[in-house]
């Protein structure tokens, strides 16, 4: 086995191969390769670990870019577990989530996340079989969170451009209207 590399660049990921690897490692949740690619591309930050060009780990976070983030899809290929791959990916996510409260659910890895500074929900909350692991407030190194507002606005603008959003960027009476069963049952169009 060669050296393990970590990246947030998703350009070199073979999504068909990743789907097959996830299925073979019993971590497939039914997404197609295209859905995998889209879910990772739409994340606030995603990390991929590779060895010799083969993806052997993933982790990603959804975030508002200011105060709250939710970690999902943390996976390490079985033969690589216990080698620090997930820990390295989590550290890379945390570097982009400075100053935020980070939350996640886990079925089997509570001990791993506790070692990273997370804690189990005080009320023992569960969602299905998944145990809630409470948020970890990440400290911002060096004081101010690197012009968080400007960075978030840039990230948001880039994301909106990537998904082809052409609507208003500022709140309007239309975007702030109350939710009714008629307006909330439809997804907004991407015109």
Image (tube, helix red, strand yellow):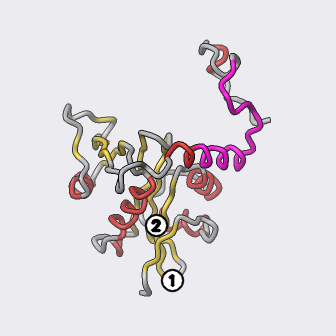
Magenta stretch bounds: 153-172
Q: Is residue 15 left or right of residue 27?
A: right
Q: Is residue 120 left or right of residue 171?
A: left
Answer whether residue 191 is magenta in the image: no
Q: Which mark is residue 2?
A: none
Disc 1 element: loop
| Quadrant of the image occupied by residue 122 | top left
Q: Is residue 5 left or right of residue 12?
A: left
Which quadrant is the C terminus positioned in? Answer: top right
Residue 75, horizontal then vertical, whole percent: 40, 61
Badge 1 is on which residue? 52
Mark 1 or mark 2, earlier in chain: 2
Q: Is residue 169 above or below residue 159?
A: above
Identify the residue at the far front of this view.
143
Badge 2 is on which residue? 24
Residue at x-position 56% and y-position 55%: 40
Q: Is residue 117 above or below residue 18?
A: above
């Amino acid at each position: 086995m060669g050296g393990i590399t970590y990246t947030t660049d998703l350009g070199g990921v073979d999504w068909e191969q990743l789907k097959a690897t996830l299925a073979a490692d019993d971590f497939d949740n039914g997404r197609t390769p295209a859905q995998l690619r889209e879910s990772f591309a739409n994340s606030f930050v995603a990390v991929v670990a590779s060895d010799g060009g083969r993806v052997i780990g993933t982790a990603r976070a959804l975030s508002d870019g200011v105060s709250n983030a939710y970690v999902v899809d943390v996976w390490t290929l079985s033969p690589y577990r216990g080698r620090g791959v997930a820990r390295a990916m989590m550290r890379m996510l945390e570097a982009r989530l400075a100053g935020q409260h980070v939350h996640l659910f886990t079925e089997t890895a509570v001990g791993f996340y506790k070692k990273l500074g997370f804690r189990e929900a005080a009320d023992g909350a569960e969602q299905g079989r998944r145990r809630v692991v409470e948020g970890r407030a990440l400290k911002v190194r060096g004081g101010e969170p690197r012009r968080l507002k400007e960075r978030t606005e840039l990230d948001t603008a880039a994301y909106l451009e990537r998904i082809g959003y052409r609507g208003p960027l500022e709140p309007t009476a239309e975007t702030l209207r109350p939710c009714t069963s008629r307006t909330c049952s439809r997804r907004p169009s991407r015109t």
